[in-house]
């Protein structure tokens, strides 16, 4: 585990990202206080891990269809005013 300050992180970000990729955990401090961590990415997502542990359930439906955008001739405020009437 490496502990670095924000200034050092900004100056050498690529090197610290490479260290994290290689499996090292990087602890970031701001004026001596721990504020964040850079950790190696895991092979599976956090959601998948929770599903595997039985803590979460997968969604029942894949994804809701997204609505088509409304095309208006004027500003959105006019559309909102019409809908309020």
Image: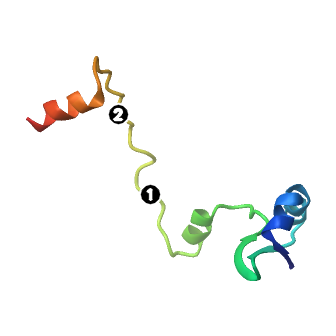
Residue 32, given in percent of the width and then of the height, sits at 77, 82
Residue 74: image x %, image y %?
Answer: 28, 20
Q: Name the one closer to the observer, 10 or 83.
A: 10
x, y percent for residue 41: 76, 62
Numbered circle sitting on residue 19: none
Residue 63, located in which quarter of the rendered image?
A: top left
* Marked residue nearer the N-terminal end (2 or 1): 1
Instruction: State the residue lying farthest toward the left.
Output: 85
Question: Residues at badges 2 and 1 in contact (C-beta under 8 Å)?
Answer: no
Circle 2 packing at 10 Å, graded few (<14), some (14-19), many (20+), is: few
Where is mark 1, residue-wise?
59
Q: Is residue 73 above or below residue 3?
A: above
Please, which residue is most extreme toward the bottom here? Answer: 32
> Can you tell which quarter of the image residue 4 is in?
bottom right
**Which of the image's four quarters has the C terminus?**
top left
User: In this rendering, is residue 84 above or below 37?
Assistant: above
Say above or below: 83 vs 74: below
Disc 2 target residue = 67
The span from disc 2 to disc 1 (Cα, nearest Å) is: 20 Å
Residue in the image at 87% along x and 59% along y:
11
Helix, strand or loop under label 2: loop
Looking at the image, residue 71 sits to the left or right of residue 8; the answer is left
Q: Residue at x 78, y 68 (%)?
A: 6
What is the x, y in percent for residue 44? Answer: 69, 61
Report whether 25 appears left or right of 53.
right
């Amino acid at each position: 585990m490496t502990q670095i300050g924000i200034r050092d992180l900004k100056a050498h970000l690529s090197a610290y990202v490479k260290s994290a990729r290689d499996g090292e955990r990087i602890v970031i401090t701001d004026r001596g206080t721990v504020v964040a961590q850079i950790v190696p990415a895991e092979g599976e997502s956090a959601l998948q891990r929770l599903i595997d542990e039985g803590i979460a359930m997968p969604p029942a439906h894949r994804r809701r269809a997204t609505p088509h955008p409304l095309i208006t001739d004027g500003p959105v405020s006019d559309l909102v005013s019409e809908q309020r009437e």
